[in-house]
Structures are given as C-alpha cells and as structure tokens.
Image (cartoon, helix red, strand yellow):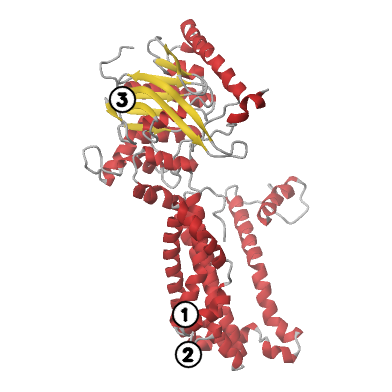
C-alpha cells in the first residue's frame, strides 16, 4: 500500500500495563504488560486487519485507538493529533453488538447524532430519523426501523451496530471481532457487505479478528501480534486486488499462500500463548490466567 | 403451569376416535373458516371461567357459609356477602367511604411519591459512588431490616398523630424496596453498553440519562410495585392505631362500634384498593419495559 505523508492513524511505541488486583496467590498484586512497543502507521482509507493469539492485547489496542484508555508509554496520533479521549472521528463496532435494547433500530442508529455535531449544530428529530433510515438502507435493513433489538437476528443486530457507527460519519471504523458471534454464512455475507461499504464510503478501517481467513480476505494488510506481551510481529501485505465477490478468491493460490503465511506467523504465538495459559484480558485489566509468581511451576 | 396443559389436551383428544363431546374434525358441519374461531372462543371462555373460578367460589362461600353452615352466633361476626355489600352501598351513599378513601389515598400517594423520588435519586448516587455505598450500606441494612411498623410509636411520638407521622411512615416503608432495586438496576447495567456509549463520546451526565437510567427502569419499577403494596399495607396499620379518618380508622372504628358489616365493607375496600394499585403499577411497568423480551414481563 502506498503510504501518504501524514498517516491517518499513527502509533508510536505504544505500551500498556495493567495493575492486577491482589489475589490469594499473589497477595502483593502484580502487573500485566498487555502491549509493548507497538509502532504502526495506517494510511487514510486503508483496511487493516489485526490478528493475534488470545490475550495478546488486541482489544486493549482498540481501546487505545478509541480513546477509552490511555497508553502508559508512547502516543496514539490521529491526523497527526494525539488522542486524548473518545471522539466522533472514530467509531467502534463491538463483537456483542452493544445495541441499546430499549431503543428501536432507528433510535439506536441515531444515538450518536443526538449531541451537537462536529460543526456545533444539533440535528432535528426529523433529520436524525432521515439519517438513520439512510444508514439502515446502506446496511440492507430498510423497513426494520421500528424493530427492537430482541426482535432481530444476530446478523441484523450487527448490521444495526455498523449503521450506528457509520451514521455520525466518522473517518475511522474500529471493529473488535464484529463477526465472531455469527454463523459462517451470515459472516461471509457481512464481510462482502463491509467491503462494499468500505469501498463506497472510503473509511479507514481497523478490524480485529481471530479468523486468519477473514483477516486475509478483508485486509489490505494483516498485522500479526505476538503472544503476551503484545508486540507487532510482522505486517503481511495482501496484494490480491479487488474482492468483488464475483469469483471464489478464497481458493485462489495467491490467497492460500498469504493465508498460510499468516497462519505460520500466528501458529508459534498461539502455541506460546496456550502453554502459558493466556486468556482474554478483561476490561478491568485482569486476566483469569494471571498467576505470575507460580507461572512456570503451574505449567510443569 | 395450568396454561400449557390446557392447550395440549386439545390435540390429544382430536387424535383419538371421538370419545368425548368435543368437536372432532369432520364430525361437525361447521364452515372451515369458522371452526377454529369458535374453538378459540370456547377455549378462551373456559380459561376465563377457570381463572375467575376460585374468586367466585370464595364469594359464594362467603354468601352461603354464614347463612347455612355457621351457627347464629358466628353470623353476627361474619355477615354474608349481601349484607356487607349493602353496608358498602350505604357508606357510599352517605359519602363516608369517599372521605375515608380520599384521606387514605392522599396519605399513601404523598408518602409513596416522596419515597420514590428520594429513593431513586439516592439509589443512583449510591450505585455510582462506591465510597458512598461502602459508607452507607451497613446503616441502610439496619434500617431495611427494621420492620416499619415497629417504628410507628417513634414516628407518632416525634411527629404527633397528624398527617406528618402517617405520611412519613408510608415514605419510610416504601423507600427501601425502591432504593434497593435502583441500586441493583444500576449495578446490572451491561458494561458493554457503557463502553459503547463512551466510545460515542457521551459525557457522564449523558451516560446517566441515556444509558444507565433507561436500562435500570425495569428493575426500578419492580421496586416501585413492591413499594406500592407496602405503602398501603403500612398506612392501613398506621390508621388503625391513631387517626380520625382513613380506611384503617373506618375498620377499627366500625369494629369498636359493633357495625360489623361496615367493618367488612372497609376491609373489602382495602382489598380492592390494593388490587387496583398493583394493576395500575403493573400497567405502568409494562409500558416502560416494552423493549424487554418476554421473560419476567408477565408478573402480576
């Protein structure tokens, strides 16, 4: 990919450490290094996918980008400016949809439109409804405006969540394993729709996934993280041209070759993570597997 | 559990050869479109009859028991239903019942209103500020587990026998169910929704208004419903001890004046009032938690 002179997103030696609550095994408490020295540039309009074993800090990295947490070392820059908190230039799509169950699909989509916009003006109720309808149409959910989330399937909920993120027109879309909870067919369908939306809107997308195939299929580049502490192991460029969904690109030899490359990079890290028993880092910064003092003893 | 058995027995009888008088497909010349509707009428009618059966039986027993089963001496203390209804009619005609009802309603509504507003505000604060919770929780536990009526003498001594003491004790009794449910409701807000709202750039105030409160509303309403029941309960007891008007006073005064049918008329009014309040609150609760899926919404 061609890098523009000022990258859209720029990570400079990012490090993030959590303090683990004292437990019976470790009465003094301990620290958990989730991310260590990550440096990465993402160009405007790029689609970057991020893979890594469990507990490698993928979600932590996304939280840093979203401004939900601050890094301990290094800087996160968006458009050359340091990220100090959440902002409407970035949107997050979560794995578990995170729709507000008391709001209809349309009301969920217009959630981000209710405050003052970037120009300081507020949208009227009608403008908001109009915008919600436009974006529900974009994700293929026209006619479902008045449905409550519990009346929608998993795939439809994720479509609503994507529409909600797009509705306030951010430049950057941060997606945290958004299709992991869906069945294979729905997932493939949504992958193609996401590519279509990306092409039509020109957003910069950072997409976290567990699926190697998904990463290679969607991304223009695949960033592979190492096992904990998360370091950037390698960036694999995926130069496969347009995915128009016309042909079965997944069985293309070039695709298979890239997939294998990412798989081998990830394989060693997954083994390491498994041997160490790493589990997902929870939002409060703890990990269920954390027994730092006796780690080697337990593994034996 | 009775509803499923009622619906499953229909296919069972239609499967076998015609053994009962039930309409079997083909045996009765009913128009094809009319038959299911008639069946549905019969079924819903039967269900309504079954549902009202216990109440009707109880009222019959009340009417006939004193007349035919009880000795004459008991009949004085347990007049049949028609005498009670006649007494009720007289009380209504003389306007006495309306006065007592108005007095009771004013007290319980004021106390209940004070309790709901203060308990919701305090619940939100306690749930949000952990330090406040740790500070207040032991004290709240002590008060919560002190029966409200045990404090009635204290309220009377400090606030006199006027309206203030009665409204206060109602407020006290209604306060704790609302408080505890508000705390529980705020505590159980899905942390993912908070993350999602934060990523959309919501401030603390916006978070409270748009995420925490709506998500806690169903739980808060459960507390409000419990508070409604206990506010009437406590009020009647308080009015029995010291009052110049109110349903509790009516009951006790009728008893001591040996106007036994009047006493029962008062009790009947209390029962109907309790029922009405509960149904009203259930209706309001439903109105506000329409978005919730079936589970738990059918509490009556």
Farthest-out residue, bottom? B257
Q: Which residue is mark 3?
A: A201
Q: Which residue is mark 1?
A: B165
Residue in the image at 30% along x and 41% along y: A113
Residue in the image at 63% along x and 82% along y: B81
- The answer to whether dots 1 and 3 both sit on one chain is no
Instruction: Tell me the tag on residue B94.
Output: 2
Q: Quadrant of residue A45?
A: top left
**Mark 2 nearby-residue class (10 Å; few <14, some 14–19, many ≥20):** few
Q: Nearer the viewer, mark 1 or mark 2?
A: 1
Q: Nearer the viewer, mark 3 or mark 2?
A: 3
Q: Is residue B51 above or below residue A240?
A: below
> Residue B99, percent across and down?
45, 85
Q: Quadrant of the N terminus of chain A?
A: top left
Of residues A108 and B116, which is closer to you in this image? B116
Residue in the image at 53% along x and 22% along y: A53
Query: Marks 1/2: CA distance?
Result: 29 Å
- The answer to whether dots 1 and 2 both sit on one chain is yes
């Amino acid at each position: 990919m061609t890098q523009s002179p000022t990258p859209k997103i720029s990570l400079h030696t990012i490090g993030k450490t959590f303090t683990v609550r004292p437990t019976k095994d470790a009465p003094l408490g301990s620290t958990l290094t989730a991310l260590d020295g990550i440096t990465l540039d993402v160009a405007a309009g790029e689609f970057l996918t991020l893979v890594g074993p469990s507990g490698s800090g993928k979600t932590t990295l996304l939280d840093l980008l979203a401004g939900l947490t601050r890094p301990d070392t290094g800087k996160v820059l968006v458009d050359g400016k340091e990220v100090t908190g959440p902002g409407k230039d970035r949107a997050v799509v979560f794995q578990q949809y995170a729709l507000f169950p008391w709001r209809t699909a349309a009301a969920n989509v217009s959630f981000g439109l209710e405050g003052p916009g970037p120009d300081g003006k507020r949208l009227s109720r009608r403008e908001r409804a109009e915008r919600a309808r436009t974006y529900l149409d974009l994700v293929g959910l026209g006619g479902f405006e008045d449905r409550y989330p519990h009346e929608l399937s998993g795939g439809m909920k994720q479509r609503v969540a994507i529409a909600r993120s797009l509705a306030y027109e951010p430049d950057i879309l941060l997606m945290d394993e958004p299709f992991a909870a869906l069945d294979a067919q729905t997932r493939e369908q949504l992958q193609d729709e996401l590519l279509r939306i990306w092409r039509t809107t020109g957003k910069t997308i950072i997409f976290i996934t567990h699926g190697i195939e998904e990463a290679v299929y969607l991304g223009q580049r695949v960033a592979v993280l190492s096992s904990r502490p998360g370091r950037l192991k390698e960036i694999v460029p995926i130069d496969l041209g347009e995915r128009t969904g016309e042909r079965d690109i997944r069985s293309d030899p070039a695709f298979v070759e890239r997939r294998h490359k990412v798989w081998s990079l990830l394989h060693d890290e997954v083994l390491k993570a498994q041997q160490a028993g790493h589990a997902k880092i929870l939002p409060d910064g703890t990990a269920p597997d954390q027994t730092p003092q006796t780690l080697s003893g337990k593994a034996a | 559990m009775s509803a499923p058995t009622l619906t499953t027995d229909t296919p069972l009888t239609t499967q076998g050869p015609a053994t009962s008088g039930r309409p079997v497909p083909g045996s009765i010349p009913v128009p094809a479109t009319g038959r299911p509707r008639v069946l549905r009428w019969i079924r819903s009618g039967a269900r309504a009859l079954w549902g009202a059966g216990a109440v009707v039986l109880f009222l019959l027993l009340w009417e006939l028991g004193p007349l035919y089963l009880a000795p004459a001496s008991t009949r004085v203390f347990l007049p049949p239903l028609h005498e009670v209804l006649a007494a009720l009619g007289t009380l209504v005609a003389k306007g006495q019942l309306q006065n007592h009802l108005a007095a009771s309603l004013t007290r319980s509504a004021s106390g209940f209103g004070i309790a709901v507003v203060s308990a919701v505000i305090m619940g939100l604060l306690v749930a949000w500020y952990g330090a406040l919770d740790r500070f207040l929780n032991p004290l709240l536990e002590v008060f919560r587990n002190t029966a409200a009526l045990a404090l009635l003498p204290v309220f009377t001594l400090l606030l006199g026998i006027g309206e203030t003491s009665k409204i206060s004790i109602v407020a006290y009794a209604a306060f704790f169910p609302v408080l505890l449910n508000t705390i529980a409701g705020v505590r159980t807000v899905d942390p993912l929704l908070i993350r999602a709202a934060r990523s959309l750039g919501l401030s603390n105030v916006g978070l409270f208004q748009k995420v925490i409160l709506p998500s806690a509303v169903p739980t808060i309403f459960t507390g409000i419903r419990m508070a409604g029941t206990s506010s009437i309960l406590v009020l009647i007891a308080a009015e029995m001890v010291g009052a110049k008007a109110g349903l509790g006073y009516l009951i006790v005064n009728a008893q001591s004046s040996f106007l036994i049918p009047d006493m029962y008329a008062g009790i009947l009014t209390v029962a109907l009032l309790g029922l009405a309040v509960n149904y009203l609150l259930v209706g309001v609760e439903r109105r506000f938690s329409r978005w919730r899926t079936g589970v738990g919404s059918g509490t009556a």
